[in-house]
Image (cartoon, rainbow, N blue to C red):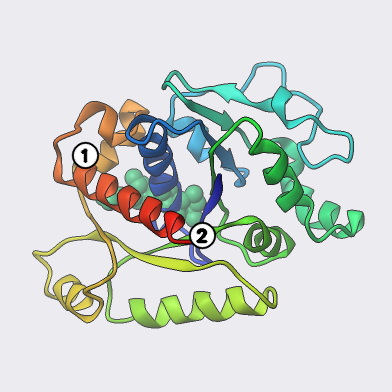
Amino acid sequence: MAAIAIYSVKGGVGKTTLAVNLAWCAATISRRRTLLWDLDAANGSGFLLGVDPKKKRSADSVFAEDSNPARLIQPTGHANLDLLPADESIRTLDRQLDRLGKKKRLARLVEALHKDYDRVLLDCAPVLNEVSAQVMRAADLVIVPLPPSPLSARAFEVVVEEVRASGKSHPPILPVLSMIDLRRSLHREARAANPTWPAIPLASAVEQCASLRQPVGAFAPRSPAARAIAQLWTAIERKLASR
Ligand SMILES: Nc1ncnc2c1ncn2[C@@H]1O[C@H](COP(=O)(O)OP(=O)(O)OP(=O)(O)O)[C@@H](O)[C@H]1O
Ligand SMILES: [Mg+2]
C-alpha cells in the first residue's frame, strides 16, 4: 500500500496530467486497486478521466470530522480505478485543517482508504499551505514534475527546501522532467544536466488526453509518451518496493 503525491509549488507543470496517467498505469498495468484523489478545486483529474461532477453536489466534506470518504468516491469507467473528486470544502480546507488542529488529518484519511485501495495518488494544487504540509505527512513518495530549462535543477531545489521546511521528516522526492522537447537545445541541455531524472516528452498525444478525456495509455498505448509514462510508473513501483 502506498500514497503517491504529484506536487509542485509551480502551476501548469503537468501535475494533473501526470497524476491521471500514472493512476491509469497503476490500475491497468499493475492491476492495483487505485484511487486518484483530486486535491485541487479545479477538478482537473475528474475532467481528464471523463468523470463529471455529480449533479446534486453532496454537502459532505471529505475532511469533516464525521465524514465517510467512501460515499464521495466515484467509479471512472476504467477497471480498478476510482476517483475521489475535489468537493466544495477544498476552497476553505486550509482554514478547516487549521481549525481541526489535526496535523495528520489527511494522513489518517489515506490510511483508512488503504483498506480498499493499494495505491492512492494525490493530485495536488500548486500551493504551499497546511494542505500541502499534510500531503507531505501522508505521502510515501512525492513526484515533482519540472518543465525542462536550465533552471529546472534550481526549481527542484526550491521545492525540496519548501518540502523540508514543511516538516522534520519528509518522504522521498522524485523529480520528473515534464514536457521535454529534444528538438530544442535548452531542453537537451536540461536533459543532459539531469541524466538520471525520468522524462516525459512534450507530445500531442498527451494534449489529446484533455479532448478525449482519457489517459494516453487508453487510446495511444504505443506512443512514445505512453511508453515514457509506463516506464516512469515502473520506476515508481521499484522505488516503493525498495522502501
Ligand atoms: N507531456 C505533455 N505534452 C504536451 N502537453 C502537456 C504535457 N503535460 C502536460 N501538458 C499540458 O500542459 C497543460 C498543463 O498541464 P496540467 O494541467 O497537467 O498541469 P498542472 O501542473 O496540473 O496545472 P495546475 O497547477 O493548474 O493544476 C495542459 O494543457 C496539458 O495538456
Ligand atoms: Mg492540476
Q: Is residue 238 left or right of residue 123?
A: left
Residue occupying the far left of the picture: 183
Instruction: Say which element carries label 1.
Output: helix
For residue 141, which numbered disc appears in the image? 2
Q: Is residue 221 above or below residue 89?
A: above
Q: Residue visible at 61% across and 33% down?
A: 84
Question: Measured from the top left, where is residue 162 in percent x and y?
Answer: 59, 77
Helix, strand, or loop for circle 2? Answer: strand
Rounded to the nearest angstrom, the CA distance separating label 2 from label 1 is: 27 Å
Q: Residue at x 79, y 35 (%)?
A: 61
The N terminus lies in which quarter of the figure?
top right
Number of callouts in the render? 2
| Mark 2 or mark 1, earlier in chain | 2
Is 108 displayed left or right of 2 in the figure? right
Mark 2 residue type: Leu
Where residue 100 appears, as percent x and y from the top left, is 90, 54
> Picture quarter containing residue 54?
top right
Label 1 CB-ligand 1 distance < 8 A: yes
* Image location (x, y in percent) of residue 227: 20, 44
Question: From the viewer's perspective, is 122 left or right of 155?
Answer: right
Given the image, on which type of amino acid does mark 1 rest?
Ala
**Residue bearing mark 1:** 205
To which quarter of the image does residue 151 belong?
A: bottom left
Q: Mark 2, residues whose alpha carbon is within 10 Å: few (<14), some, or many (≥20)?
A: many
Q: Is residue 189 above or below residue 198?
A: below
Q: In the displayed structure, does residue 183 sit left or right of residue 69?
A: left
How many residues crowd mark 1 within 10 Å: few (<14), some (14–19), many (20+)?
A: many
Q: Residue at x 41, y 22 (%)?
A: 78
Quadrant housing residue 153: bottom left
Residue at the image point whose x is 35% and y is 29% from the top: 214
